[in-house]
Amino acid sequence: MKVGSEQFLIPVGVVKVSKNEHRVKFRDKTATNGIRSAVFVLGKDGLYRGKITMVGLDLDVLITNREQLPLCAWFGVRVGNDEMLQGLSFDIPKLPPSKRMTLPGFCTDISGQW
């Protein structure tokens, strides 16, 4: 997975897929920088919805630019040769010391190139 210029990798063979292939899970309780867990569930509409927990991210750009939030940045996921690339809104709903970041939706006002 890539967010802006940071790239986070999940090693091959550690992702668990349910028997009916409707749920995809990954968990690394020891992660200190990157993806701690990810769960994606296939909905009745054919779209996957998920939750990703990440640790060790540098959120300074969000904290120091609160007046410009939500911030639009590149978000991409690649599995083998399949890739999804989209602009995603990043926001911090509470003031520091909160470490929670939300992704309120997709966006198109992306500065720079991937």
Image: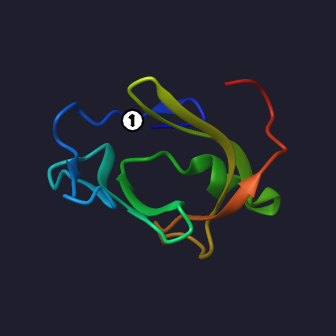
Q: Quadrant of the N terminus?
A: top left
Q: Position of residue 55 (x, y in %)?
A: 35, 52
Residue positioned 39% across, 35% down in the render: 8
Q: How many labels, in total?
A: 1
Q: Is residue 48 above or below residue 7?
A: below
Location of residue 13 (image quadrant)? top left
Indicate the quadrant containing the C terminus: top left, top right, bottom left or bottom right: top right
The one of 6 and 79 positioned closer to us in this rendering? 79
For label 1, the SS is: loop
Q: Amino acid at mark 1?
A: Phe
> Measuring 64% from the left and 54% from the top, which residue is drawn there?
62
Which residue corresponds to the image point at 81% horizontal and 57% vertical from the top-left? 68
Q: Could you tell whether 56 is left or right of 27 in the image?
A: right
Residue 38 occupies quadrant? bottom left
Percent from the top left, x then y, of residue 31?
22, 47
Q: Position of residue 71 (x, y in %)?
A: 73, 52
Q: Measured from the top left, where is residue 41 in percent x and y? A: 39, 64
| Residue neighbourhood size for the residue with mark 1, other residues' Cα within 10 Å, grouped as few (<14), some (14–19), many (≥20) | few
**Can you name the residue that lies furthest to the right here?**
109
As drawn, 10 above or below 21: above
Residue at 81%, 34% (x, y): give it: 111
| Left or right of 22 on screen, residue 96 | right
Using the image, determine if residue 106 lies above or below residue 82.
below
Look at the image and name its color scheme: rainbow
Q: Which residue is mark 1?
A: 8
